[in-house]
Image (cartoon, coloured by chain):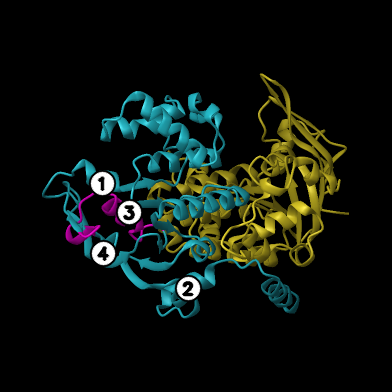
Amino acid sequence: MSLFEIENLVVEFQTAAGPFRAVDGVSMKVNAGEVLAIVGESGSGKSVSMLAAMGLLPWTAKVTADKLQFNGIDLLGLSPSDRRTIVGKDIAMIFQEPIASLNPCFTVGFQIEEVLRIHLGLDRAARRARAIELFDLVGIPNPAERLSHFPHQMSGGQCQRVMIAIALSCNPKLLIADEPTTALDVTIQKQILDLLMRLQAEHGMGLIIITHNMGVVAETADRVIVQYKGRKIEEADVLSLFEAPKSTYTRALLSALPDNATGDRLPTIAEFLSDDQIFAGAVR
Amino acid sequence: MTHVLEARNLTRDYHIPGSLFKKAKTVHAVKGVSFSVDQGKTLAIVGESGCGKSTLARIVTMIDPATSGDMLIDGAKVDIARESLTPEMRRKVQIVFQNPYGTLNPRKKIGEILTEPLIINTNMKADDRRDKAMAMLKKVGLEEKHYGRYPHMFSGGQRQRVAIARALMLNPRLLVLDEPVSALDLSVQAQVLNLLADLQDEFQLTYVFISHDLSVVRYIADDVMVMYYGEAVEYGSREEVFSDPKHSYTRTLFAATPRADVESIKARLARKNAA
């Protein structure tokens, strides 16, 4: 049985111009200890499908799926309070903007200890000890001192480490990283990716990395899903995706990489692909 | 031939005033940087956040004065700390910023955004300004119907095209591009990079291209300068820097850049299976 399974997920938003389908029939599976990358441009529904699975979408969103299962539990049928016992504990998420996703009014120590108090019910001393241990784990120097710092006193890379520490605090079975390194410098990006991969291997977590950076995919993933406008275009293991992409869209995406540039102009997707051509090869 | 832009030993210090509990201190944001760019060429400045590359962009665009050192544009020395800037000088250098969502006034139509530099810096008539803006819209791959629209009606890539069009309205010699594609999707990034290359060919523009994405730099640059804590640790032609990086920081930077070729993936999977 897979750790996390989605079948035919559809997310619609009510807008003034009628319903807008952000995710259109996406299916995926993640096993324990596996790294899945979801690639797509902005608006391809990659974040929305994960937010839907965690139940973090606003009430304007209508979520339907044939199956939305985590560890054998049906996530769709859960009451909000039951869902909260799983989300944040067994499924954790790291968001794109580390500085924006931490609360500026509280110290980072308070924010990590809050998770430990609510999900694990540890007492004050145990919480502090565990928080120090976690900060140490993600490579924050002087962890005990850092606990009393506010997010604005830390750099973007440090804040992202705090986010990862919070996400890992309850030893999640599944970690969803939504563009974990987009806002960071390449050297910091490398550190964060190495950290994620090391922790994933040590804890045997399932890891979903959402990104639009093909380099990040190549460096981390076991399996890759390519999405476009809410639909799944291609699913393959990482080597065959880069070696022999099946769909025209993936091929176009890879040829738009400046690394692969031949000649003095880059091929662009809009120039030679219409939506129909892109969807023609789509898998369900 | 004189260089379009030449910098000799530029430095910039920021003085942070002290308070009751803090001592005043001086931040050396740029420490003695020299470089030159010729017409129609692209100089890429690479480095991580806080290395002084945006400070350098502010000096080159004459927003901030340099603390010491000389900057020459078209062979003429510029020192905005001592003398005020002439309109001719101001027209020569324009800038495109990173975030196309934050740099366009949301309450102005695209037409107003494009004609504003002309109103401030030239004596053109309203009709001429409009014609020029229309022509520029087409140049950057937009259409005349976009003239009366507001920025929120455009996608990120289109907004960046508007920002580029605005920078080109005064026919500048030098365009400073401060991370112009890092907020864009891969396919849109390719379109904007192509547009920049087309415009460079057409107007013989000179670019100072600031970026932290080495794959983009490798694609667009003629010369590359790597900055680290305010110093230029590496400066040379693209081939030199990429094939034979001299400074250890440049090598760190190259090693940290994710590689998307099949061999690196095979090597990584082999390492993983072995572990």
Residues in magenta, as a range: B49-75
Sequence-wise, the earlier of marks 2 and 3 is 3
**In the image, residue A107 lies at what x, y percent?**
44, 45
Mark 2 vs mark 3: same chain? yes
Q: Pointers 2 and 3 in contact (CB under 8 A)? A: no
Sequence-wise, the earlier of marks 1 and 2 is 1
Report, in whole angstroms, how far the alpha carbon at label 1 lies from the one at label 2.
32 Å
Can residue A152 be seen?
Answer: yes
Q: Which residue is mark 1?
A: B63
Of all chains, the one bearing label 2 is: B
Report, in whole angstroms, how far the alpha carbon at label 2 lies from the one at label 3.
24 Å
Q: Which residue is mark 4?
A: B2
Q: Which mark is residue B252?
A: 2
Which chain is represented by cyan in the image? B
Report the side of A133 relative to A40 (left or right).
left
Can residue A127 be seen?
Answer: no
Report the side of B168 relative to A103 (left or right).
left
Nearest the camera: B122 or B84? B122
Q: Pointers 3 and 1 in contact (CB under 8 A)? A: no
**Residue B166, picture quadrant:** top left
For label 3, the crowd category at 10 Å Cα-Cα, with few meaning under 14, some 14 to 19 and many 20 or more, is many
Report the side of B125 relative to A205 (left or right).
left
Q: Residue at x 45, y 38 (%)?
A: B136
Residue lying at the far top of the rendered structure? A16
Report, in whole angstroms, how far the alpha carbon at label 3 lies from the one at label 1.
9 Å
Asked if residue A33 lies in the magenta stretch, the reply is no
Q: Which mark is residue A41?
A: none
Name the secondary structure under disc 2.
helix
The amino acid type found where label 3 is placed reads: Ala
For label 2, the crowd category at 10 Å Cα-Cα, with few meaning under 14, some 14 to 19 and many 20 or more, is few
Sequence-wise, the earlier of marks 3 and 1 is 3
